[in-house]
Amino acid sequence: MATSAQYAAPVERAPLSARISWMLFDWSVQPFYTLILTFLFAPYFANVVVGNGPKGQSMWGFGAAVAGILIAVGSPFLGAFADGRGHRKPWIALFSVILAVAMTSLWIATPSAPPATIYLVLLAFVCATVSAEYTAVFTNAFMPSLVPQGELGRLSGAGWACGYFGGLASLFLVAGLIVPVGDTGETLLGFSPLFALDTASREGDRIVGPLSAVWYLVFMIPFFLFVPDIGQKRMHDGRPATAELWDTIRSLPHNRDMLLFLAARMIYTDGLTAIFTFGGIYGASVFGWGPLELGLFGIILTLVGAFGALIGGWIDDWISAKFVIVAALLILIVAAFGILSVDAGHVLYFMDVEPKAPGSAPFSSIGERVFLAFAVIVGIVSAPVQASSRSLLARLAPPDKITQYFGLFAFSGKVTAFLAPLLVALVTAATHSQRLGMSAILLFLVAGIVLMLPVRAPAREA
């Protein structure tokens, strides 16, 4: 059975300015994920704003869960409503404004804030998370109109890499030049901060939200100027968009390749999420890593992930997106076994090594280096899995329902996101072993491969 994407009219390559401007969305939005969700604001919220690490982490987790539910439920409906009903840029503009306002609102997160302020910050966090993901649904839908199908892999991979580099650049700007670290009054690079920020009220931590908003708005300007937004026109029979979405969902069993792909992505994305969630925790537990080691670890994985996305994009177009996804998941399984083979006194399960000496330099022990080597492999192949998933969806989806299918794509990435972390937690609690708990992730990667193997990727364009 041929996929509907194979019947689409040939697409000419858009001008370079349009393609680069589309990639800049990933660059623009990445500080939200890097600075707010991962490295800077989330730990500050839990430990300082709430003032109780476990309680703050729990509240942040509940906020993330609420956002995940709203993303999973809302994305398909938004996509169905948008397809065939005009331009997509107004939707992107709407959610961009909400995202920028929500990030700016994080400035109110003062130390030991009263409950009302804490809940307002959580509301802003939820709104920002949902808006960022909703915006991605619409920006992803532009892909098939920018390049021929034979170039979708490189476009998606380059965009993913652009996001990684954007995260690193924003982290360098904020931690290296703006935010003072510790009691020295200097930035991470040893410079005086560019702005006079009050350390008592933690303005250095709070400014992350407004800076991320400014970054996003500035770098999204080229998207609105140069990415063509062709108005979609489609005859409707008067039924609401929800009815169209229901028809699409009911037709999925007859679209075998799309159904298998969405199910596979749902499972292996859970595994990837768990790897990113628990990988640093496992390393910190085994080797006693502190903020310096964890920060360097994150930077290294981000760098190799960017280059992995670029390389994966070329292989995607050269062979197929399916090949990239399956091969990368197989390599991930091998690398995961390698990571789990390392503990304080052993590598490769049975080889004895000297434990890390207290106070020694980062990554100075053999165990750390072996762990880091396998982690680098994870970083290299995890980005291509995500970038090629995006390009494969763009190839499989019917052109007149592309936004709707990217809504289902977002749904598949969120609807079961709790399963892998939950299984890791349950196995760890039952066995009292972090290694056995982490091994549960392998089940999701294997299941993802099994579901991907029968997927028939569209024939490559000549």
Image (cartoon, rainbow, N blue to C red):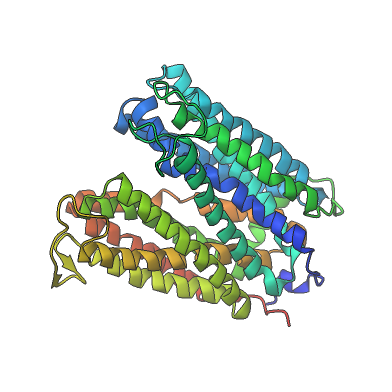
Residue at position x 71%, y 72% from top? 149
Residue at position x 41%, y 31% from top? 45
Count of labels shown?
0
> In the rendered view, does 61 fall on the left or right side of 349?
right
Q: Quadrant of the N terminus?
A: bottom right
Image location of residue 302, percent across then percent down: 46, 57
- In this orientation, does residue 421 appear? no
Q: Tell which of 33 and 217 is nearer to you.
A: 217
Q: Is residue 329 above or below residue 47?
A: below
Q: Is residue 371 above or below residue 237?
A: below
Question: Looking at the image, which residue sits at the far bottom?
Answer: 462
Q: Quadrant of the C terminus?
A: bottom right
Name the image quarter holding residue 348. bottom left
Q: Tell which of 40 and 128 is nearer to you.
A: 40
Name the image quarter holding residue 71. top right
- In this orientation, does residue 225 appear? yes
Image location of residue 322, percent across then percent down: 55, 74
> In the rendered view, does 161 fall on the left or right side of 41?
right
Image location of residue 138, percent across then percent down: 69, 50
Residue at position x 52%, y 73% from top? 324
Q: Is residue 448 above or below residue 224?
A: below
Image location of residue 305, percent across then percent down: 47, 62
